[in-house]
Image (cartoon, rainbow, N blue to C red):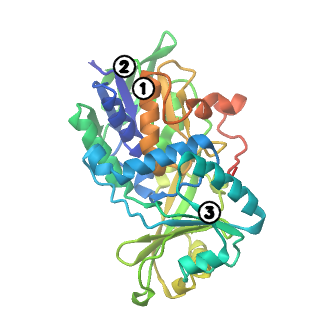
Amino acid sequence: MRTADVVIVGGGVTGCSIAFHLAERGVRDVVVLERRFLAAGGTGRSVGILRQLYPTPETSRMVLHSLRVFQNFQEVTGGDAHYVQCGAVIAVGPEQAAALARTLEAQQEIGIQARLIGPDDIRELEPRIDPFAVGAAVHEPESGYGDPTGVTTGFARGARRSGVVIEQMAEVVGIRVEGGRIAGVQLAGGDEIATRVVVNAAGLWCRQIAQMAGTDVPIVVGRHPVFIIERTPTFGRPHPIYLDLASGTFLRPETGGLTLTGFLDADEPNHPMDPEALGADVRFDEVARIMERASRCIPALGDARYQRGYSGAFDISPDWMPILDETPVPGLYAAVGMSGHGFKLSPAVGRMMADLITDGRSSVADLAAFRLDRFGASADAGDGAFSHSYLR
C-alpha cells in the first residue's frame, strides 16, 4: 500500500493550486488524483474572467492576492497564465447604484484600483458600449482574463518540480475512514493510498467524494452556458470585459476576433445539471436570446456571427462563496463550492488551503468566513435556498 501525507482529489485549477502551495509550505509527500486529465472538469470550460468586484472584505483580499499572482505568474510558478489586462466595466441598474458605491469604497480601502463611473463615462471609455440600463458602473483597469488550463498546468508543473506526484486517469472510488477519521483512498484500478489528510477539490463531483467518507457538502451543480461569437473585421480593436448586471449579460474578448458571452442572471441553481453533461450543446432559443442581449449591450456585435456554444457548470454553495474548511470527518478537507469564482480565486484558495492544513490560519483572508458550518443544519442537505450578490 502506498502512503502520502496529503491526497488531493481533483486535478482542476483548485486542486493543482493547493498542491503547489502545499509544496511551497514544505509538504513534499503530496499526491493529486485526477479521474481524467488536468482541467478536464469545470476548469476547462471556464471563461477565465478576473474581475475584482466582490461583496466581502475576505473575497476582495483574495481576488487582489490572485490578481498579483496572475500578473507575475511566470515568476511565481514558471508557467504562463496568458493574462490579458484589458480592463473591465461592471455596470448595475439605478436601484443598485448606492450599493455599488459602498462596495467600491470598501474595496479601495483594501487596495483594489477601481473608480465609480456613470453612463456618459462608459461611452467615453468605450464608445461601442450602449449603457441603456445602467445607473452606475465601476471601471477596473487591472482586471482582465487568463487561460484556466494554462494556469492549471502552470501550478501542476511547479508542484511536480517540488516533488508532488500528479496522477491522471486515477479515479477515486472510495475513501477509507477508521476510528472516525480519514485513513486512505481507494482507486478504480484497485490501488489504495494510505493517508491521514484528503482534500476534496473535485469541483462538480465534490458531493460524490464527500459522500464516500460518510458526509456531505451543500452544493448544487448548476448549468452555465457559454457562447462564442465572431466579431466582424470592421469591429476594430477588442472591447474590454463588460459585465452588465442590469441586463444580465457578460462579454469577454478573445483572440482571433472572438467574443465569449453568456448570462449573468444567477439562476444556475434553478438549472441543475449532471456533471457528466459538461460541454454539451446549447439550445437554439438560448443562442437567440444571448445574441439579442449582446447586440443590445454592444450594438456593433449585431453583425457578429455565432460560432458555437457549450454547457459549462458551477459547483454552487448556498451563498455563492467557497467552502474552505475541515469537514466533520477529521482529516477530510473541502475546497468546494467555488460558485463560478474558481479560476479567479485559485491562487488565493490554494494558498489558504495550504495554510489551513499546515497552520490552521491564513494571512491572505480570514478562513472563518468560509467555514462549512456557516450553513447550519443545511450543511448536509445540498438543497437549501441560494442567495447571490455582487454588492455589499
Name the residue located 44 percent from the left edge and 82 percent from the top edge. Answer: 231
* Picture coordinates of residue 109, whole percent (x, y): 59, 47
Q: Quote the CA–CA distance across marks 2 and 3.
A: 41 Å
Crowding at mark 1 (Cα within 10 Å: few <14, some 14-19, many 20+): many
* Picture coordinates of residue 287, whole percent (x, y): 56, 75
Q: Nearer the viewer, residue 246 or 283?
A: 246
Can residue 299 be spotted in the picture? Answer: yes
Residue on which the image places disc 1:
198
In screen coordinates, is 153 left or right of 200?
A: left
Q: Nearer the viewer, residue 124 or 94?
A: 124
Give the amino acid at mark 3.
Leu
* Picture coordinates of residue 343, whole percent (x, y): 45, 50
Residue on which the image places disc 2:
195
Q: Quote the CA–CA distance across marks 1 and 2.
A: 7 Å
Give the amino acid at mark 2.
Thr
**Vertically, is 269 above or below 186?**
below
Name the residue located 44 percent from the left edge and 67 percent from the top edge. Answer: 86
Name the residue located 36 percent from the left edge and 34 percent from the top edge. Answer: 21
Q: In the image, which disc is placed on residue 180?
A: none
Farthest residue, direction right: 95
Q: Quote the CA–CA distance across marks 3 and 1.
A: 34 Å
In screen coordinates, is 191 left or right of 327?
A: left
Q: Earlier in the sequence, mark 3 or mark 1?
A: 1
Tag 2 secondary structure:
loop
Tag 3 secondary structure:
loop
Residue on which the image places disc 3:
264
Farthest residue, direction bottom: 234
In screen coordinates, is 17 left or right of 160?
A: right
* CB contact under 8 Å: marks 2 and 3: no
Location of residue 48 (image quadrant): bottom left
Give the total of numbered labels.
3
